[in-house]
Image (cartoon, rainbow, N blue to C red):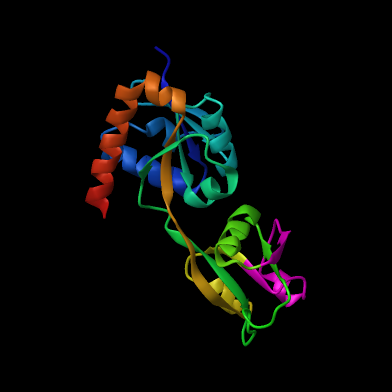
Amino acid sequence: MKPLRIALTKGRLEKDTVKLLESAGYDCTAVREKGRRLILPIGDGSIEVVLAKAADVITYVENGVCDLGVVGKDTIMENGRSFYEILDLGFGKCRFALAGKKGFDFFSGYEARTIATKYPNVTRNFFEGKGMDIRVIKIEGSVELAPLLGLADAIVDIVETGSTLKENGLVIIEDNVAPISARLIANSASLKLRKAEIEELADKMETERKKMQ
């Protein structure tokens, strides 16, 4: 049988997932010593890790070339959901926040506000829930620039400590847009065809996650 293939988001989520898998008894030496390789065996090779960018993790899982994936809730919210979200892994915690220039009354007046963000779908859904009419401008780089340059009234972005906002003269208006953490996702066909293998891995990860809390 071919290996159970799990796509990991490169960087911090990759490192945290490897740590969790090792705690669950899996040998992740090949992943730790990966060099430039992007497809790596775990343990006896019955599980295979694929290293990818966050949005690509979802693409690989949705299209069935990977059975499982580890990706942030932010990427899931922005990029669709034709897969199963089976476990909150509890790490990679941060939150979406609405932020703007200090002293600016965002909710006053009647004109539509302009929001700069890397996450247009998340932003539109949030403001639709509030019944507010907004204009969204997608920014790829530092969204903090947009209000400073007068391009937008506010931003929606991921916040961990808030120090970047503070250093750029911005303040949080609302920080309850959505909480974020790493999630284990599964391809819908894989979840049926390889149910026992996936449940075994997910159960071990869940057990170790609870220990780490």
Assign the C terminus to one quadrant of the image.
bottom left
Direction top: furthest residue: 1
- Of the pair 38 and 93, the residue shown nearer to us: 93
Q: Is residue 45 visible?
A: no
- The question of residue 172 being in magenta is answered with no
Residue displayed at 56% across by 33% down: 36
Quadrant of residue 151 within the rendered picture: bottom right
Most distant residue in the bottom direction:
103
Tell me the quadrant of the picture where the N terminus can be found.
top left
Residue 118 in the image: above or below residue 86 = below
Q: Residue at x 45, y 43 (%)?
A: 14
134 is within the stretch colored magenta: yes
How many numbered circles does the render carry?
0
- Residue 199 lies, with reference to residue 46, above or below; the image says below
Task: Report x, y in % for residue 27.
Answer: 32, 31
Q: Position of residue 192 (x, y in %)?
A: 38, 22
- Residue at left offset 26%, top offset 36%: 204
Above/below status of 108 relative to 117? below
Residue appearing at x 58%, y 56% in the figure: 122
Query: 154 or 19: nearer the eye?
Result: 154
The foreground one among 22 and 34 is 22
Residue 141 appears left or right of 84:
right
Looking at the picture, how far across and down is residue 153, in whole percent?
70, 74
Provide the residue span drawn in magenta: 133-155
